[in-house]
Amino acid sequence: MSGRERLGALSMQTAFLAVLFSVWYVVTEGSQITSLFLPRLPRVWSEMVGLAASGRLYAAALVTIPTIAKAFAIAAIFGIAVGFLVGRSERLVRLLEPVLSGMFAIPITLFFPLFILFFGIGPDSKVAYGAAYGFFPIALNTIAGFSNVDAHFLRAAKAMGASRYQLFRHVYLPAAMPVVLTGLRIGFFISFAAVLGGETISSAAGIGRAIALSGELMETARMFAWIGFVVLATMILNIVVLAAESRTRRD
């Protein structure tokens, strides 16, 4: 994407957010909509400032962020390992790729009570849940990346006497890396969402638990403030990840 295209996309995204917040402000300030359903924008901002100043945001993030990091690390390690081993064999691709795709299509949320049963309501159950959910897109993209390496490149490298390591380093890895990076990006945000979703369902602490508790107590403005922090973090992370992915592709 050229600089002009990136600027155009950023302008459209900024305009969309500006319109969204403008509509929110006008609707809540100039109508009879109860704040129980849609709080006033200044009230939400005040709650966000209060949460940050009081340290509650920091305390909740200390629970959620390490949980997401652990879940994604486990998903990435096992997803890339399984994807690489399967993607190197056409027989294994035909045998296991449909199985993994079918398992990914099953809503793993149905099995969340099992994670609670095995790991408890603490962060461990959310780590396992996020890792299980993030594993599949990483593994499937890794399989696609390594299994679709052009056979002509492999034959040419072998004809020139390339070793297994050289094949991996100079043929497999450059060819598969863009697809693998896409899988890592998708897997990260799925793990991110799974951990937060798990915290809202059953957890003793964390940002997801704070959102659920605010909803249970009918503190709508505070609930929107917590959600606002999550949306802001997601947007920043997405920009950073896309920039890193784009730079890696160019390299």
Image: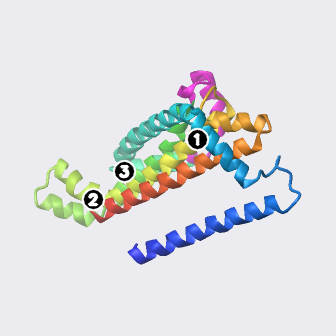
What quarter of the picture does the C terminus occupy?
A: bottom left
Amino acid tagged 1: Ala
Hey, which quadrant is residue 5 in on the image?
Answer: bottom left
Q: Which residue is mark 3?
A: 87
For residue 251, above or below residue 103: below
Q: CA distance from mark 1 to mark 2?
A: 30 Å
Q: Which residue is mark 1?
A: 194
Is residue 203 visible in the rendered image? The answer is yes
Q: Which residue is mark 2?
A: 174
The residue most toward the left is 161
Q: Is residue 117 magenta?
A: yes
Q: CA distance from mark 1 to mark 3?
A: 26 Å
Amino acid tagged 3: Gly
Q: Residue 185 in the image: state x and y as whole percent.
A: 45, 52
Q: CA distance from mark 2 to mark 3?
A: 15 Å
| Camera-side mark, 2 or 3 | 2
Earlier-in-chain disc, 2 versus 3: 3
Q: Residue 168 in the image: state x and y as whole percent.
A: 23, 51
Q: Are marks 1 and 3 in contact (CB under 8 Å)?
A: no
Q: Nearer the viewer, residue 239 or 46?
A: 46
The residue positioned 83% from the left and 63% from the top of the image is: 30
| Camera-side mark, 1 or 3 | 1
